[in-house]
Amino acid sequence: MKRLALAIAAALAAASSLFAADEPEKPWKYVDALDLRVINKGWDNTLGPYTRIPATLKDSVRPDLWERTQCSSGIGVRFATNSSRIGVRYNLLWNTHLIHMADTGLKGTDLYVWEGDSVWRHANTNRPYLVKGREEEKLVESVYMSNLDTARMTEYMVYLPLYDGVTRLEIKVDSLAEITPGSPELIRADEKIVAYGTSILQGGCASRTGMAPTNIISRELNAEVVNIGISGEGKMDACMAREMVKIPAKVFLLDPVPNCTEMMCDTLTYDFVRIFLEARPDAAVVMLEGPIYPYARYDSFFGDYLPKKNAAFRRGFERLRADYPEARLFYVTSEGLDGPEDDGTVDGIHLTDLGFRHYADKMTPILRKILNQEE
């Protein structure tokens, strides 16, 4: 038995020495994502390449609103390559951390692969460790996959961090590999949806970036979905509406109720939504109620108050429907928004991946019908 164990150990050592004797790692080529195709971004005139609202709004909005729109939530990069390896290198804006959200969703990135059968498959997620010795740059570098098929061009998509910003992002591939912006028919720009809302819409608290609700909906509708979810600050600001209507979207999804009081829902809804109806009569507007949080079933205050907010929001819809009878205006209740058993939250409010799956399952068929994509 001892001789067998020694023989196995010797074989393992020999194999290890063979691997150690392999040639040095092949060189990488780093490609700026801006030279590929950036998707799900609403405006070009932003302060940074992956921030989400126009630079001209900086002095018009609250500091907290401005800061939270510097997160890159929902933004992605499309490309195709025949590389045997795929990786990423990027600089974070803050390197922030939250106690109730995984770092992989907060400041990691997801890689998706198009399988050619109408399905985007999640391939891998990078763990956002800072590169040693370059911590001041907040530099993250990772390899998603190796040993890939180099005989053909494969379509890929990378989703950026949900609750942190990115100042620069590069896709890394084999130095001799071909890389292009990919097919424009995948995640189409001409089917654009703009989604406005709160921390839930922004992606809190998805475990990885591809599970933000707008990203799920985007993949399933093959359409760009611009994420204007603003943690704590989706409060129906008129200046935000006036900028959003400039985006050539086919649908505006409005989901602000969680950040609004009952009084705000009562006094702001009509004028906020009217901006969309008057400036963009060619587009559809979808008003989504706020969720009834699981604890509201037992907490008598919230059990009474949350439905009152939705009722005020609904009254705004009814007024708008009466005043703009020709508008393509839709109202969606919150029933089943976070799942049939209220099982989709981290903290009673923000959603898990399961909760975002429920959210997308509710909204995707509605949006598909509005876009005339019914199968």
Image: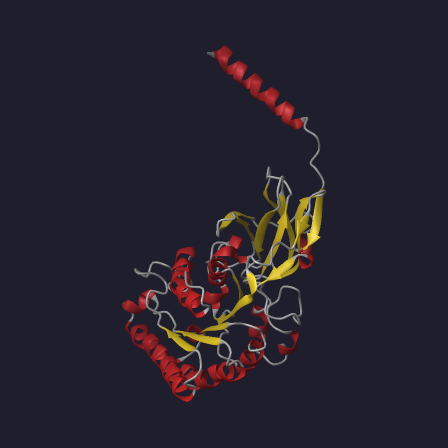
Residue 110 spot, x, y in % from top left: 54, 52
Q: Is residue 76 above or below residue 240?
A: above
Q: Is residue 75 above or below residue 62?
A: above
Residue 256 spot, x, y in % from top left: 45, 74
Report whether 152 appears left or right of 261. right
In depth, the one of 246 and 95 nearer the eye is: 246
Report whether 337 appears left or right of 207. left
In depth, the one of 215 and 165 nearer the eye is: 215
Residue 374 spot, x, y in % from top left: 41, 63
Q: Which quadrant of the figure has residue 332?
A: bottom left
Q: Is residue 18 above or below residue 357?
A: above
Q: Which quadrant of the figure has residue 317?
A: bottom left
Q: Is residue 338 above or below residue 270?
A: above
- Asked if residue 215 shows in the view, the reply is yes
Q: Which quadrant of the figure has residue 348?
A: bottom left
For the C terminus, the quadrant is bottom left
In depth, the one of 274 and 125 nearer the eye is: 274
Residue 77 spot, x, y in % from top left: 60, 57
- Asked if residue 139 shows in the view, the reply is no
